Amino acid sequence: MPFTNFPNGITSFGIPIYGSGFGPIGLGAGNVYYMVTAKDSTNMFYQKLLSNGIKDSKIFTTLATAYAATSSGQNDVIAATPGAYDGTAELAWSNAYTHFVGLAGPNAMGDYYEPGVVLYTDTTQVANVVNLTGHNCQFYNVAIQNAGNHAENIAALRLNAYGCYFGNVGLMGMMTANQDSEATAAALYIHTDGHTPIFDNCVIGQDVWGTRDAANSGVVYFSGSQPNDGLFRNCIFKSISKTATCAMIAAPAANAVGRGWIFNNCAFHNFADDGTQMNQVFYGGAASAYPWPVILHNCMAQGYDRWTDNTDYHIYGNMPVADDGGGLAIALDETVAGGA
């Protein structure tokens, strides 16, 4: 079989290769659908897709219409060209083995005013931008952001499916005043069926938009019952708060976190311009909130006094002691560092 060129394949025997270094979506990729911000003569991405032979019927301007074209269980792919895509309703992503790739590259740290590829809402009472219940789905090179100024705008992503993968994904929530004051608001929700996810090189939270002040809230919020075996690898968790009771990872209910959660080489940062230290990175509202060990491997936290305030929780780490519990950042001034 001869080699084929993009968009049908890159010396890939017809299998589209996506993922910016993470490898192909899967052997025997299904249908590929594209997103552009506008179908007009000034949108060069749209014009280039047409000139490359992509049918107009496979090009969409919203996530909802692109997703509606996909079928479950056959490795269909939505490939989004650069831009900000505004959604006015929650997208219920229930198709399994159905994937999303942003085509602006691996940097997903910008907001929807300075987008690479951003899926967002600024409509009020949209609980989640994406409510993911389809298992074994993959997301690459995309920012997902919930900026609706309402207490019911809960998260950017609600994960309630097993086996999903996220590479170079940015998640922002609590971007507005009414979200900042809501204890159940977060950037990422992990629910009961959110087993075995992998988050690679992801940035979760933000330290520019909203200043959180809801006690015991979290940028990541475990909302269900015992999802197991998640992995955050090389991820950054970000927050801005001057309220000491704001945590980074919240699990208010008993048994909200299952076994085998690993944070590998992750950093947790809270910004407070008045120097306030947050009480704890991990908040659990019940003694059994962490019935199984949560593992911190080569992690650090800045802007926090402790990893957790509750000695009943099973949080283990291998970090050398910079401060109480290991891995908590200290100021490297001349006194602490031993300078003259």
Image (cartoon, helix red, strand yellow):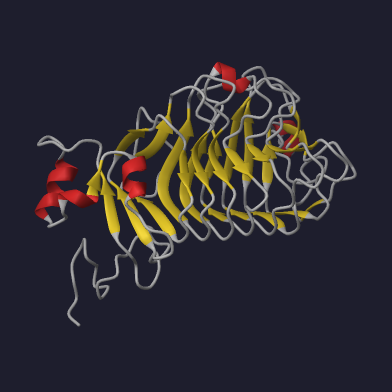
At x 76%, y 51%, the residue is 320
Image quadrant where residue 300 sits: top right
For the residue pair 57 and 321, the one nearer the viewer reads as: 57
Location of the N terminus by quadrant is: bottom left
Q: Is residue 132 left or right of residue 75?
A: right
Task: Name the spot of residue 193 as percent of width and height, x first.
Answer: 64, 53
Task: Name the spot of residue 275 as percent of width and height, x first.
Answer: 68, 21
Q: Answer above or below: position of 50 versus 307.
A: below
Q: Answer above or below: position of 16 versus 148.
A: below
At x 74%, y 48%, the residue is 225
At x 54%, y 31%, the residue is 127
Task: Name the spot of residue 213 as percent of width and height, x first.
Answer: 67, 20
Task: Name the spot of residue 219 as percent of width and height, x first.
Answer: 62, 35
Q: Is residue 278 left or right of residue 16?
A: right
Residue 108 in sight here? no
Q: How many marks?
A: 0
Residue 173 in sight here? yes
For the residue pair 9 and 200, the one nearer the viewer reads as: 9
Q: Is residue 132 left or right of residue 289?
A: left
Location of the C terminus by quadrant is: top right
Extreme residue in the bottom direction: 1
